[in-house]
Amino acid sequence: MPKVGIPRALLYYNYFPMWKVFFEELGAEVVLSGLTNKKMLDDGVNCCVDDACLPMKVFHGHAVHLKDRVDYLFVPRLISVEKNEYICPKFCGLPDMVINSIEGLPKVIDCTINLRDGNKSLRKAVLEVGGLFTGSLSRIYKAYQKASAELADYERLMLNGATPLEALNGNGPPPADYQYSIGLIGHPYNIYDNYVSMSIIEKLRARGINVLTQDMVCKEELDRIAEGFTKPMFWSFGKKIMAASSYLIDQRNVRGIIYLVAFGCGLDALVGDLVERRIRKKGVPFCMITIDEHTGEAGVDTRLEAFIDMLEWRDTQECL
Amino acid sequence: MLVTFPHMGNAYIAMKSVLEDLGVDVLVPPPCTKRTLELGAKHSPELACLPLKLNIGNYIESLERGAEVIVMAGGCGPCRFGYYAEVQREILQDLGYSFKMVVLERPQGNMRDFVKKLSMVTGGKSVMQVLASIKRATRVAVMMDELEKLCWQVRPRERVNGTVSRLMQEFHSKAYKARGSRQLSALIGEYKNKVSGVAVQEGSEVLRIGIVGEIYTVIEPYVNLSIAEKLGCLGAEVDKSITVSYWVINHLIKEALHLYDKRELNEASYPYLRSFVGGHGQESVANTVLYKRKGYDGVIHLLPFTCMPEIVARSALPEVSRQYDIPVMTLVLDELTGEAGYMTRLEGFIDLIRRKKELDKAYEEVLPGN
């Protein structure tokens, strides 16, 4: 059975159930890299171009971790996943970055997904990747359909408040008695990777706070808000983050917003500024935490605690 | 109504030409200085790329001098430049400035919208008048780039160091005062003659260096610390892969009409970067290959800190450099770039190329004899 390696990084958090089912239906074995750890990050930092953002380095680390254990490495070129939008320039060149930076790679599956001008390239990519494992078109289509259905289930669980980790196990969010909610926004691969985010979700939940992320808001709501932007936002994640911050404040009554930013992320630099200006005008507490490969956990904990204390202090001390 | 726009090297000449021909009062922002950068860095997001910060500095210095309308270009991604105007407008509004911002962008290939927006600035001028002035401005931009190119060629060969630079300083202070395409093109022509008349040393061996990278850092001398001038004084003739006229003709005009032919670029960058990555990332890789084919001795790659497309290009350049045997140096620029360290690196790079050239020549002389 051919082994396909999927790095547990970047869009893993958005699409893994789909990729897994698709490859398994085609008779391949899916090998997932382990949870991010210090060694992986160091490997990534060593081989990746040094100006790249933290998540790119994490991805390179996962690729290094997988390369000797698999027959194929799955590094799709995700240019765009929505009409008229992009993900980010680095995603457009991701397979090239990996191939240029890491030596001794197995065959890289670098199909191009570009839905910017329509769905045509998706079909091509599915057939191209499927063709590596089987000659039967109907088998590829069936695998794709099953994979899409799996993705829909996964997204539904997230809408109900589950984190990707819970949703991947088929679970909803843990039942708990939360006192109030706060919004946690940022790129999925930053906020859900427990090594990168220093388990921020668990830490907040342990304080009795319900955590709402942009993935827990339905797409239609976000698109509706995004229509009100003065200029359409051409980054899919940027759009989601910006729309979700105002949705969470207006509709879900969050007490504050935390934006987890990766050092070197180009989108976060601009989107973060726009989001901050909007949130401040609404008078809602806002905290931006920048993470990089050096971040000390104690510093992050202190900032989180100070932010939570401030939210709770406002309850009792501030006349609204 | 006093109109201003951000600086990008000699782009102000083309902007002046197009707007003044249409009878608009133009305020060219004062040349970028330390103050411009400090103002910009103070009010912009910390990790935004350098051009955004300098733009903000330009706007503030123009608004202080009474500008009322800001003209800015836009884009549709994935490079951050496409969202600059939105962020910049909010920054300036929150600072309490009152102004109108006109964003000229190509809305998915529709030239008519572009002209319509331009006429928001120009008032009652007809579409034909606008198009005619764009055409004249394009010609001015081409002439200006020819003049610059001439400077790059003459500077390493000039007999008295600094002659060309002094002429160009004179030129720019006159260009600020000239009005409209007619005066500007006359001025450019005059200085073309003056620069070609500069006394040169015959037979001096000159290195040829190509400059690739992000458009703003390649074109704006304040940001790249006048790299063309510095290299010229070190005895190297430079060529820039991207110039103002290249950008206007290929990205504003040809791309809108679907005439921009990217086949050569795609072919040259193919093994290393197989996709468009926004900005000029793919061009940087392709042009490095093309410079080697044209016989250049080395390539310098410029990018502002955190520039997304150029980071992707940067990851490919070491491989290009190895396989094509061409020295490539990447210089990352931001508001903390120090001139002495920068100069040392340029000198080191030039020394390395000179040495490499000698060695290559020695090999060539030895090998045929074997």
Image (cartoon, coloured by chain):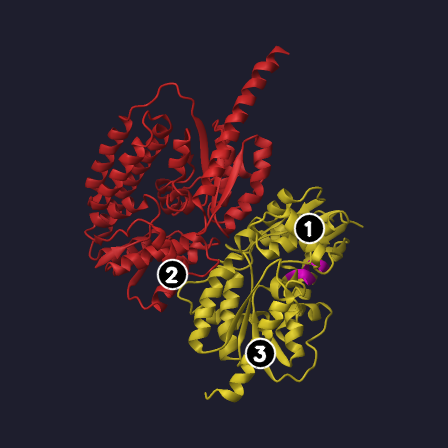
Chain colours: A yellow, B red
Q: Identify the chain of the residue marked 2, using the numbered disc in the image.
A: B
Is any atom of residue A182 visible in this view?
no
Give the distance between the C-alpha atoms of the residues marked 3 and 1, in whole angstroms.
35 Å
> Could you say where residue A251 lies in the image, as x and y percent from the top left?
51, 80
> Is residue B267 shown above or below A54?
above
Task: Give the mark nearest the N terminus, 3 or 1.
Answer: 1
Q: Nearer the viewer, residue A192 or A220?
A: A192
- For the image, the number of numbered tags is 3
Residue at the spot of label 2: B88
The part of the image, by quadrant, that contains residue B236 is: top left
Residue kind at label 3, given as amino acid type: Ile
Residues in magenta, as a range:
A15-21
Q: Nearer the viewer, residue A273 or A303?
A: A303
> Could you say where residue A248 lies in the image, as x and y percent from the top left?
53, 76
Residue at the spot of label 3: A308
Residue kind at label 2, given as amino acid type: Gln
Is B366 placed left or right of A31 in the picture?
A: left
The part of the image, by quadrant, that contains residue B1 is: bottom left
Residue kind at label 1, given as amino acid type: Asp
Q: Is residue A16 magenta?
A: yes
- Residues behind callouts 2 and 1 on a single chain: no
How crowded pointer 1 is (Cα within 10 Å; few <14, some 14-19, many 20+) is rated as some
How crowded pointer 2 is (Cα within 10 Å; few <14, some 14-19, many 20+) is rated as many
- Residues behind callouts 3 and 1 on a single chain: yes
Disc number at residue A43? 1
